[in-house]
Image (tube, coloured by chain):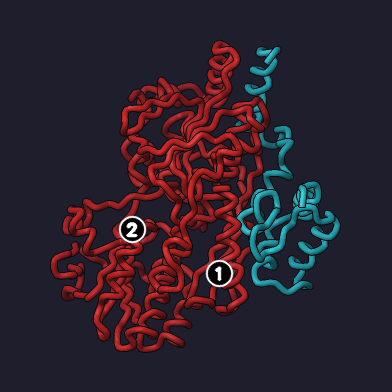
Amino acid sequence: MNTINRRDFAKSVGALSLVSAAGITGCASIGGAAKPKVVVVGGGYGGATAAKYIAMWSEGKIDVTLVERDAQFVSCPLSNLVLGGSKSIGDISVAYGGLAKYGVKQIKGEATGFDATKKTLSLADGTTLAYDRLILSPGIDFMLESLPGLASAAARNKVLAAWKAGPETVALRNQLVAMKDGGVYAIHIPKAPYRCPPGPYERACQVAWYFQQAKPKSKVIILDANEDVTSKKGLFTKAWNGQFKGLVEYRNNQEIQDVDANTNTLKMTFGEDFKADVLNVLPPMRAGNIATQNGLNNANNRWCQIDWLTYESTAVPNVHILGDALQIAPAMPKSGHMANQHGKVCAAAVVALLTGDVVNATPMVANTCYSFIDDKNVVHVSSVHRYDVAQKTMVTVAGAGGLSAEQNALEGVYANSWAKNIWADMLT
Amino acid sequence: MPIRTSRFVAIAVASALANFAFSQAPASPHLARNLAAQCANCHGTNGKSVAEVPSLAGQPASLLVQKMKDYRDGKLPASIMHQLAKGYSDEQMALMADYFSRQPK
């Protein structure tokens, strides 16, 4: 890959976008009637949305290909309900194929890398796909080098993360079902930022709700590396001190050195080892492998920086990045809802860039995040974000957004409705 | 594509303006569409809901604007819309409402 030269070149030429836009049009013109090509990697909340909206908004003027390794979409949001037992994995899965009617071509495969100079994407099976604009929605991968005890797949199959919904979600549910009454389930939460800030606390509620019905002598222990609950604190602690009193215990500042998967033991930085019957460890996270292995993780060597108007990487031109892999803007959560919104802003920008239209200079995104306390009662956090010209990032709109006053069943209905609509918005 | 040169110029100029001179940049012709796309997560693509949350597609613009303002001003009880409505200006509400009113039910 020639990314360094390319990046230096971009830096030396102040008018980057002017040059790159000219380059694209020039290629398209020389090539004759060929449509501009967009290749999207990752069929999750960000990527599938971007693919659909580019195809829909360009009305066939852009050739869109979506590369996804899995046969079906499995939602991370709502996956904690599979652990609680009120939903099955099938309830949170959606078959791919619904985007064909917009003209999106889908390829089942694993993207391994790209050539920023030739503008081609490589797949594990040797296929090469040409692009004018490449969109990566790679999600997160784990920083396993920080936990040597989880280096092997066998260790990670025993001490599960289940932080990507799918087989691990089912496996963790099975561990909980197999656990004896009177046992301990412990979840370790890494220091923020990590994917889905309220997710671990929702998970603790869901497991507690299951224990309450099936194994009332059991305990849920939350070992949080953070100083405090990172999201919806008041609403979660109210549940832990209320309906789950005696069942859930929260401990802050619980940093770990390593994990011993053989004995389900956490090696704590301070204090004695901690052992659980079912141990659930969320390792520290960074941008997905395709981003980190190709020089896109230019924020702390961990997350990807972008231009918030176009979602184009600041490291490599013509490569756009969405979702949890991003170095987030202030108060912007790493959520599926947010990734879907990234997908639409990016789609609008990419369509504009490839069809000679004006890129929106005032993009906005909103976040709505529901967490289930039990099978019916839900709490939310919401926010609205606008582009700030001076700061060149997204900032929250003052006075907008907020939390639920308390958990309630109406928002349980809305949360399920949200899932159906957002899955349709990205996949059908 | 008959007039390559002018298309090239248009892209280059637009891109330059968008990136270097926001205040003078022409507004995106798709501002309403882009703003409205934020609502689709809960209200369905182009405002056509497939679940319990109501559709916005094909609703009169005046009704949608009034509801948004009532949510914003606390005149209409809500679980979440009172918080989200505070994020948008009157002009943005009007653009979104106009867009949804033109979408098929």
The chain identifier of the residue carrying mark 2 reads A
Q: Quadrant of residue A57?
A: top right
* Element assignment for label 1: strand
Indicate the amino acid at tag 2.
Pro
Identify the hue of chain B: cyan
Mark 2, residue position: A167
Visible in this render: residue A399? no
Query: Position of A269 compared to B66: left or right?
Result: left
Question: Residue A304's spot in the image, x, y percent?
Answer: 42, 43
Of all chains in the rendering, the one displayed in red is A
Q: Nearer the viewer, residue B14 or A176?
A: A176
Mark nearest the camera among 2 and 1 is 2
Which of pointers 2 and 1 lies earlier in the amino acid sequence? 2
Residue A380: which numbered mark, if any?
1
- Asked if marks 2 and 1 fall on the same chain, the answer is yes
Q: Is residue A75 left or right of residue A345?
A: left
- Looking at the figure, which quarter contains the N terminus of chain B? top right
Question: What residue sits 58% from the left and 18% below the top?
Answer: A25
Image x and y of residue A16, in percent: 52, 25
Question: Looking at the picture, how far across and down is residue A142, in whole percent?
Answer: 30, 52
The residue under the point 36% across, 59% down is A163
At 65% from the left and 39% from the top, the residue drawn is A361
Bin the neighbour count of mark 1 within 10 Å (Cα to Cα): few under 14, some 14-19, many 20 and up.
many
- Foreground residue among A82 and A49: A82
Q: Taking A196 as reference, is A265 left or right?
A: left
Mark 2 nearby-residue class (10 Å; few <14, some 14–19, many ≥20): few
Residue A217, percent from left and from top: 30, 88
Circle 1 chain: A
Give the secondary structure at mark 2: helix
Amino acid at the residue labelled 1: His
Question: From the viewer's perspective, is B36 left or right of A304?
Answer: right
